Image (cartoon, rainbow, N blue to C red):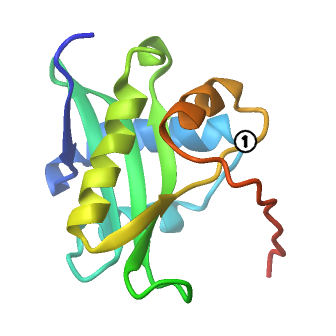
Amino acid sequence: MSDVEIRPVTAADHDAWLPLWKAYLTFYKTELPDAVTDSTWRRFLDSNEPTHAALAWEDGNAVGMVHFIFHRSNWSINYSCYLQDLLVVPEQRGTGVGRKLIEYVYVAAKNGGADKVHWLTHETNATAIQLYERIAERPGYIQFRKPL
């Protein structure tokens, strides 16, 4: 793997981030209105928002992205950090970029006062699950949700 740099997004990164975001939504067979995408991007740039984004860069190209959100928990005095979205471009999967993005979140969460990072993935995402089982615990909970 070439030297990959992980850094927080800046306003100048929108054109690099957007194709990754769209690829992520496509992977999960999801479509969102442009207004949601625009709002999400603005939140990343607002220091008052608890949501953050970083890109993985290799040779001037964005090859991965991660989004994470700090939130309160009733089970801890400290914050928790939810790693909401993670994508590595197909040609970079298996090279360590995903691990570097997650480790970036671990450091950002610890520095931000969180005592836990947690995330979900779809049960069919076997490639990602192989990585996740090496770098995190799998507590066995099942997610339920009700769209409103």
Q: Nearer the viewer, residue 132 or 82?
A: 132
Q: Is residue 38 above or below residue 131?
A: below
| Residue on which the image places disc 1 | 29
Residue 7 placement (x, y as % from top left): 18, 44
Is 114 above or below relative to 103?
Answer: below
Residue at the (66%, 51%) spot, across then down:
31
**Secondary structure category for the residue under label 1:** loop
Rendered-image quadrant of the C terminus: bottom right
94 lies left or right of 50: right
Please give the count of numbered marks on the rendered protein. 1
* Residue in the image at 70% along x and 32% along y: 125
Residue 126 lies, in percent from the top left, at 70, 26
Residue at x-position 81% and y-position 59%? 142
Bin the neighbour count of mark 1 within 10 Å (Cα to Cα): few under 14, some 14-19, many 20 and up. few
Q: Position of residue 127 (x, y in %)?
A: 63, 23
Report which quarter residue 63 is drawn in: top left
**Image position of 98 (left or right of 138):** left
Q: Residue at x 69, y 55 (%)?
A: 139
Tell me the quarter of the image containing the N terminus. top left
Q: Choose top left, top right, bottom left or bottom right for residue 43.
A: bottom left
Coordinates of residue 64 in the picture (x, y in percent): 37, 33
Viewer-closest of 125 and 17: 125
Q: What amino acid is labelled 1 in the image?
A: Lys
Give 85 or 141, whichever is nearer the viewer: 141
Query: Does residue 75 sit above or below 5 in this rendering?
Result: below
